């Protein structure tokens, strides 16, 4: 009769799997592993773990928005903002790696690129920054394609916010309540008018709008730090995996996820 092992710190956290997930490709070097490849792998694995947590929190925030629990929504969105701050801070760690140290193992990344982070695309889709052409990078039969397609066609956090605002009695155009958008959020004068009214009359919803723009600003900050990290490491060279590197990332800085929360400020 076998005895079951008591749960402990290591088994609860599945540290055997986590700590065995780093396999530097430079291990095959005749002269030994490139020292900084381990840092590169771990920092990106940590980013992906944070992405997983953000998706977990966004899904919960949408659920709480549907049932009208604005206090819980605020709490969760502030948690996401805190996670993003941690991620931005982690860029400081990877920036301790010099361009020469990165170049020593960069060729071994082959076609691998941060552009392929499907979890980050899921985050964008789940917030409302949807682009159907993102799916073109994946095989239609793959699990990743199916997951992204699901996110593309389900209500985003912005959709949930608009529905919530309508339930509070604000004059949201009917088309926003009937259709789920599968493209990035387009600025709309009618929505800006609704948000303007909120800022002048509804303290609770104003707080929610400010938390959403905090989240948007945090993601823009993350993008900016990511760009500067890439420029610091490889300059304006093309990125791995055929991406245009910093040039591609720079274009994203002009695309806030919630454009009307920014544009309304010119009217307040």
Image: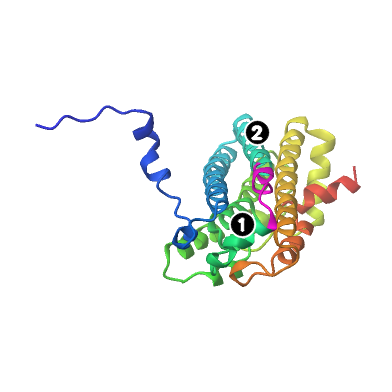
Q: Quadrant of the C terminus?
A: top right
Is the residue 122 above or below the residue 136 in the image?
Answer: above
Label number found at residue 74:
2
Give the Cα distance between marks 2 and 1. Answer: 25 Å
Is the residue 217 above or below the residue 247 in the image?
Answer: above
In magenta, the rendered stretch is 90-99
Q: Main secondary structure of the magenta part?
A: helix
Residue 88, x across and y down, in percent:
68, 43
Residue 193, x across and y down, in percent:
82, 48
At 69% from the left and 58% from the top, the residue drawn is 99
Q: Is residue 182 left or right of residue 215?
A: left
Residue 195, x across and y down, in percent:
79, 44
CB-based contact (under 8 Å), mark 2 and mark 1: no
Residue 250, x across and y down, in percent:
76, 61
Dot 2, how many residues are within 10 Å of its Cα: few (below 14), some (14-19), or many (20+)? many
Label number found at residue 178:
1
Q: Secondary structure at mark 1?
A: helix
Frontmost residue, 210 versus 47: 47
Frontmost residue, 132 versus 48: 48
Q: Is residue 252 left or right of residue 120?
A: right
């Amino acid at each position: 009769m076998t005895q079951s092992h008591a749960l402990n710190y290591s088994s609860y956290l599945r540290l055997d799997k986590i700590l065995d997930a780093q396999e530097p490709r430079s291990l095959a070097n005749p002269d030994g592993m490139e020292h900084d490849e381990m840092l590169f792998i771990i920092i990106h694995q940590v980013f992906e773990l944070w992405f997983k947590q953000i998706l977990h929190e966004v899904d919960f925030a949408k659920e709480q928005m549907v049932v009208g629990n604005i206090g819980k929504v605020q709490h969760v969105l502030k948690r996401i903002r805190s996670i993003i701050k941690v991620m931005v801070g982690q860029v400081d760690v990877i920036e301790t790696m010099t361009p020469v140290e990165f170049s020593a193992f960069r060729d071994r990344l082959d076609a691998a690129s941060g552009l392929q982070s499907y979890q980050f695309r899921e985050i964008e889709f789940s917030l409302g920054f949807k682009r159907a052409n993102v799916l073109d990078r994946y095989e239609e039969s793959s699990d990743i394609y199916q997951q992204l397609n699901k996110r593309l066609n389900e209500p985003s956090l912005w959709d949930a916010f608009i529905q919530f605002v309508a339930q509070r009695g604000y004059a949201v155009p009917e088309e926003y309540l009937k259709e789920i958008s599968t493209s990035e959020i387009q600025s709309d004068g009618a929505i800006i008018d609704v948000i303007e009214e909120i800022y002048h009359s509804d303290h609770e919803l104003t707080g929610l709008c400010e938390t959403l723009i905090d989240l948007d600003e945090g993601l823009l900050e993350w993008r900016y730090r990511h760009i500067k990290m890439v420029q610091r490491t490889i300059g304006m060279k093309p990125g791995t995996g055929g991406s245009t590197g910093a040039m591609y990332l720079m274009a994203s800085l002009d695309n806030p996820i919630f454009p009307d929360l920014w544009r309304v400020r010119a009217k307040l």
